[in-house]
Amino acid sequence: MKLATLRDGTRDGTLVVVRRDNQALAPAAEIAPTLQAALDRWDEVAPALAALSERLDQGAIDGQPVEVSKLGPPLPRAYEWVDGSAYINHIILVRKARGAEPPATLETDPLVYQGGSGVLLAPTDDIALTNPEWGLDFEAEICAILADTPQGTRPDDAGSYVRLLMLCNDVTLRNLIPPELAKGFGFFTSKPATAFSPFAVTPDELGPAWRDGRVHLPLRSSLNGELVGSPDAGPEMHFSFFDLIAHITKTRAFTAGTILGSGTVSNADRGKGISCLAERRMLEIIDDGAPSTPFLAAGDQVRIEMLDPDGRSIFGSIEQKVVTQ
Amino acid sequence: MKLATLRDGTRDGTLVVVRRDNQALAPAAEIAPTLQAALDRWDEVAPALAALSERLDQGAIDGQPVEVSKLGPPLPRAYEWVDGSAYINHIILVRKARGAEPPATLETDPLVYQGGSGVLLAPTDDIALTNPEWGLDFEAEICAILADTPQGTRPDDAGSYVRLLMLCNDVTLRNLIPPELAKGFGFFTSKPATAFSPFAVTPDELGPAWRDGRVHLPLRSSLNGELVGSPDAGPEMHFSFFDLIAHITKTRAFTAGTILGSGTVSNADRGKGISCLAERRMLEIIDDGAPSTPFLAAGDQVRIEMLDPDGRSIFGSIEQKVVTQ
């Protein structure tokens, strides 16, 4: 099933179920008022949500038209946002771009950072350009929303803790990263609010494309209407979501509603394009000695989506415009 | 006023108001069901909470006895946990202890990291000793709970966003820090769940001890019944809470209920003792060439509290026992 959050002036919005063709929605607040409330008692409410979803899909109820501009992020505020960096090609390129070495444990120990989760952006919210000198960039990723997940979860057991999948734009301020990482405490100020896709879907919506803790489909990123990347999110995800869950639960447990990101989807094959501008800039440095692609500027439009093999959008699209703040 | 959260089997517990002498509490769920709910609409509910607090303090109502073991952390799950490191003496000592240099911007650019906030510990919850090799340590700190705080907040305006103050034990796995920081993404696995004091209090409860965004009182840490530190939390907090708020809002906004930590309270005067074992171990290395104080072991008991000038506990005490997991 596909779930979304309708903005209604409250902090958490109201839960809706979305028809498989993304064209209609049905209010689900009688089952659970918000997505977080549904996640809090998932086993109890999931059957009723699934039944509502089925009635909507089969035309037993009409539902209301989906207006994406009225949707919030599926979780407008989440208890944790943990973002991995599971695509090795991305790590190598962006570190090269800032003159840093990949960590020695690149292929054996997952990279994750803890991001801000209290203020999250809707799929159509503007991206604020506070200071053009900060090097505004997008990063297209896949995310999992977790169930209550105990400390010490093993990769083999991790699948049952993945409740929902969605997409995100992990907005990044590239030029703030080097000084911030030099301090040793992580990305803090270099990561402003993250935006999410309109729909969060149960893994079964992806059919065989969800396997081994990976989403085996291309993730499409467009800039100002031009498709700039469609790397396959599957085979080159070096650490699967299951590996990432095992990693993050090494020393603590996670609460229902925790969002776990894949990191920027990236393929070694250049023909697959890019999921962030930093990669393209690095390729330009390698080829030409200097980057020619600028970072995001006011008016730029970013679109991120994933299509199923029949060309239908699974998560709806993130469509954000950069605006001067 | 003093607020606390009574555990009731739900995820967020139930809000109570606590008498100034810490001995009695009154249910406040009719005003706001949970502390997060109160923070969500603070301006609306704070007068009623204050009135209830006053009736309790003046004996107009008896209240129920406070049993600290039945209290959760004031926020059992929070939307963000951002921890500073504002005491320069602590930074210098712990970096020396792990052979790392303090950052070049030590005195001009605050250090903060984003911590896990989905699973927080009550003041009397056990500290899990998962693996003794990880180097389990406590860290005594002061925290602020923030209101909705906009991007670009200036230090001069930051005071109005501090809703409540409390204490925390920012449990740390010292031996996991060097490999984790070497990866460049922050502390992630080296920071398990954090524990908080029983009571979160409005800044006015501290009287003149709350000034300039600092708490000017000693923070007392005891290990196995022995007082090991009582450094003054005031003058040596190089970056005040107001400075920290200005820093963290540089690139994004924060939602009501965000917890902001001071970092380990530390004084240059050795006579004031320590607020974590890493500092004592570093002093032993400086004096004797090697540390003689072990990290925490099963059965160890940590106590953290702060007394007002009349010797009364302001926040109640964190009293945790280390147990093998």
Image (cartoon, coloured by chain):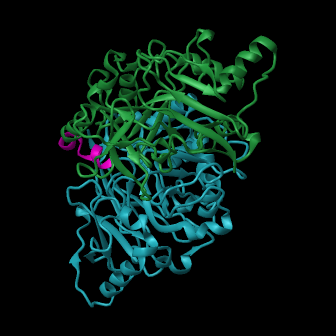
Chain colours: A green, B cyan
Residue A128 percent across, percent down from the top left: 65, 46
Residue B201 percent across, percent down from the top left: 42, 71
Nearer to me, B97 or A187: A187
Q: Which residues are magenta?
A: A36-45
Residue depicted at x 60% and y 50%: B252
- Residue A199 appears in the picture as rendered: yes
Specify whether A120 is left or right of B130: right
Q: How many marks?
A: 0
Residue depicted at x 50% and y 45%: A69
Specify whether B109 is left or right of B5: right
| Image quarter (top left, top right, bottom left or bottom right) of the N terminus of chain A | top left
Specify the quadrant of the image occupied by residue A163.
Answer: top left
Nearer to me, A157 or A287: A287
Specify the quadrant of the image occupied by residue B209.
Answer: bottom right
- Residue A169 appears in the picture as rendered: no
In magenta stretch: residue B192? no
